[in-house]
Image (cartoon, grey):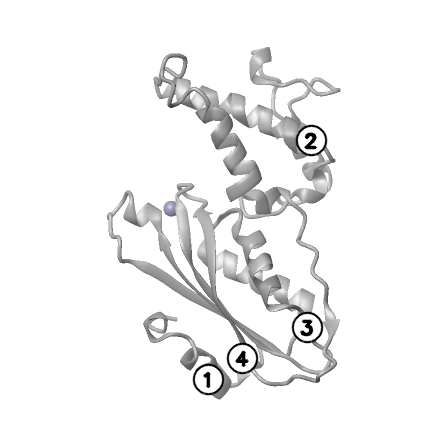
Amino acid sequence: MLMKADPNPLATPATDEGLPMSVKIRERLLAARKRFHANDNIAAFIEPGELEVLLDEVEVKMQAVLDSMVIDTASDHNTADTARRVAKMYLNEVFRGRYAKVPTITEFPNAEHLNELMIVGPITVRSACSHHFCPVIGKVWIGVMPNEHTNVIGLSKYARLAEWVMGRPQIQEEAVVQLADLIMEKTQPDGLAIVMEATHYCMAWRGVKDMESKMINSVMRGVFLKDAALRREFLALIPKRSMNGN
Ligand SMILES: [Zn+2]
């Protein structure tokens, strides 16, 4: 699906070819047949310096949203810079995990031959739902069952990987699967278990306006799938209030 060039030159910051940056990036993705859903990382398709150009483009489009909401950003000092602020917040902060490369994590061979269940958590995670772009804030627990070939990564590195995956418009069920795939790829353990418990602000701020409802889900890989005792051991080590649900 090709996008027509916008007739309003102000709405489309020009690039070398006169195309908006988003169109250029989209065309590369289409040419490579790569998916670019909200929770996909597209860093490989963005050249150095292009994110700044993309940010200018998002600012212009965000200003158009404010204009359409009939907000007088010219006289209202509170919203004068909102378009720029929101564009920066999306691209550089809350959705950075879409545009930034995977954090570099140093993996070490498992020299100690650790083969005991290791649990990391709770790791605080912040995301936003793909449906409403409302915050999703919660906690993640990660259980790793290493073997002698498993790469060892520092505890804080799990948090960095989680931050990268959650820093995209997400769907909780897909987020935990993406995180599990990433940790499996980086560390190659015998088993991996992840539990995520989060408040979805699209349920708290709008919709049913329920501040208490939390969504809990989990993903199990390798030995955690086969070994019910190991699964129980992991779940028992997570605080009680997080164990209702599955
Ligand atoms: Zn939502």
Q: Residues within 10 Å of mark 1 (few under 14, many from 20)?
A: few
Q: Are marks 1 and 3 in contact (CB under 8 Å)?
A: no
Q: Give the residue at mark 1.
A: 233
Q: Can you tell which of label 2 and label 4 is closer to the viewer? A: 2
Residue 152's disc number: 3
Q: Can you tell which of label 2 and label 3 is closer to the viewer? A: 3
The span from disc 1 to disc 3 (Cα, nearest Å) is 21 Å
Residue shown at the point (34%, 48%) measured from the top left? 201
* On screen, residue 88 above or below 237: above
Identity, as a three-letter code, of the amino acid under mark 4:
Phe
Residue 50's disc number: 2
Left or right relative to 50: residue 122: left
Residue shown at the point (62%, 18%) measured from the top left? 5
The span from disc 2 to disc 4 (Cα, nearest Å) is 42 Å
Q: Secondary structure at mark 4?
A: helix
Q: Can you tell which of label 1 and label 3 is closer to the viewer? A: 3
Q: Earlier in the sequence, mark 3 or mark 4?
A: 3
Q: Residues within 10 Å of mark 4 (few under 14, many from 20)?
A: many
Q: Give the residue at mark 4.
A: 224
